[in-house]
Amino acid sequence: MNTMFRQPFGRLALVGVPNCGKTALFNALTGSRQRVGNYAGVTVEHKTGTAVTPGGHRFTVIDLPGTYSLRARSPDEEITRDVILGQQAEEARPDLLLAVADATNLRSAIRLVMEIKRTGQPMMLVLNMIDIARYRGIEIDFGRLAADLGMPVVSASAVRRGGMDRLWAALDQVAEGQAPAATENRWTVPGVADLRAAQREADALIARSVRHPPKPDTLTTRIDSVLLHPVAGLLILLALLFLMFQAVFSWAQPFMDLIETGFGLLGAGISDLLGPGLLQSFIVDGAIAGVGSVVVFLPQILVLFLFILLLEDLGYMARAAFLMDRIMGEAGLHGRAFIPLLSSFACAIPGIMATRVIDNRRDRLTTILVAPLMTCSARIPVYTLIIAAFIPERQVLGLFNLQGLVMFWLYAAGIVSALGASFVAKYVFWPNEPTPPFMLELPDYKLPRARSVLFDLMMRAKMFLRRAGTTIFTMSVLIWVLASFPAAPEGASEPAIYYSFAATIGRFIEPVLAPIGFNWQISVALVPGMAAREVAVAALGTVYAIEGAGESTQQVAQALAANWSLPTALSFLVWYIFAPQCMSTLAVIRRETGAAKWAWITFGYMLALAYVASFITYHLALVFLPSFG
């Protein structure tokens, strides 16, 4: 291998097909010395970091988006192509490419490596997950593979102790002047025939260098025979989603109670310390009631993220996309849209950004338009507050939590509405474009790494708490100011908030929202709620705390039950299924599509859908639930 090195390098770029373990390798190389941003002008994630070898040499490492070819059919693949070819603005061409391949599945990876080699870039092939390959009895002739490819080949296991030793040693050699040589750039954009010919050549090369056991591991095949069954597979997927929403209520409740108790003790302590007055009201009713009413839902959001992360690490997400392809195709969506839409359960913003893996512009735009309809984690505080106030906590059939069942149907309504909206968009914007066929490589099943899952959960918790400490806190203070001034006049008979700016603004908006059952308090909450959906909970917490209902989430829920009718509560839930209550999402749609009109289209159709659906829900509830009117 040493004869294939030549000169020292400082910038490494990781490139590979999706699901090859590239991100795990990047984390193993850089540890905590990494940062995430976007490439200039596009919302494609840009992850860089610093690797320090055992010999003390430092490299800048760039994690390029996954790709199957440099012909670039989507925005993330264009970034990978431009960085490798040195055409990316403000991004210098890497000195060395580390082509990462899954040692258990080399077909697509070797064909990609052969294509990239034609660019003339100095390269090294890293066979990741080598421990799994050996466990399965796969034998790889490293010398033959290196000779046939004309580049160094090293093994690695990014998730095992000592699994990086050979790669670290190779990087030390690179730093000491023994680096792969660059060659002439002979790359041209490949056509379909070129790709087929390259795959045949890659298969022949693999046949010479890799030997599989006579009885290969069939665990993945046996599991897939059940999970990919057209009927049983869909039922299992539905059961997993159902379990996830049940767990959001059941598993998180003890931790929510603990957080709520903590905020309650904090508020009581400050109240005793300061005594009655404006400062006490600002801290207790404004900051603590506003922020605390949202932070209390952190356990539920983390439970949701835990399920999504586990399903991703297991390799089940690709199977779910395969199962949903036929259903989504009937609605005008590509099968690849499933993963961005499922990601939108956590947050619509990364879900919208994940659509860059869809190479067809029509399919990508359709997915972007409907992604905000998926029930994101920001809706959980809203749903939980209303469900806790109006839905009794009891078991159904001795197995299911009634509140969890309601939450499940709210999520189901979001899914159905997204499919319906995509069906309409298909015939409104692109009536004559057929949906392209769906091709997807299914990765092997792998046990999730506890450390990786916990790290990702901590990052999500930090993001949520940062949002609570900035946007939600700011909006809570704003609502407190509007709800506290001006003070009630001498001899006032109503609560002081009824004479405030908030009441004036709410009553001004109320006539527009009265047909769907909303009072002035709801009207006030919806305005700052445009910043982020969960701000509405903070706003309601602040308004009802100032009214004297108390600052805990349970007390706010009791205040809603006393002041709202059931038809109003149902109308409010339906509003939040559809309403565009998140300006950040609209901003990302604007940046991702490159046109403001798509953000305005999203805002307009979601607002109209929310109003019409809430109107129908409210008036049907008045007819069929008159005793709750």
Image: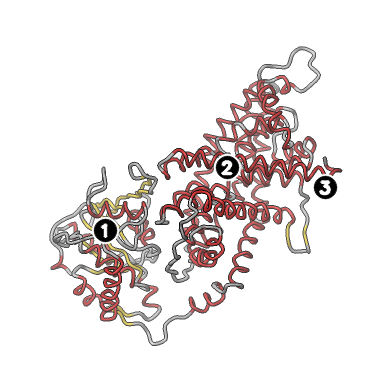
Quadrant housing residue 628: top right
Q: Earlier in the sequence, mark 1 or mark 2?
A: 1
Q: Quick one: 504 or 105, which is closer to the camera?
A: 504
In the rendered structure, the answer to whether residue 590 lies left or right of residue 533 reads: left
| Amino acid residing under circle 1 | Pro
SS state under label 2? helix
Q: CA distance from mark 1 to mark 3?
A: 72 Å
Number of residues whose C-alpha sits closer than 10 Å to that of mark 1, classed few (under 14), some (14–19) or many (20 or more): few
Tag 2 residue: 605
Q: Earlier in the sequence, mark 2 or mark 3?
A: 2
Q: Residue at x 38, y 48 (%)?
A: 44
| Amino acid residing under circle 3 | Phe
Tag 1 residue: 54
> Where does the image place residue 619, in percent across and percent down from the top left?
77, 42
Above or below — where is 57 with respect to 605?
below
Q: Residue furthest top?
A: 490
**Image disc number at residue 624:** 3
Quarter of the rendering occupied by the N terminus: bottom left
> Where does the image place residue 259, in percent across and percent down from the top left?
64, 44
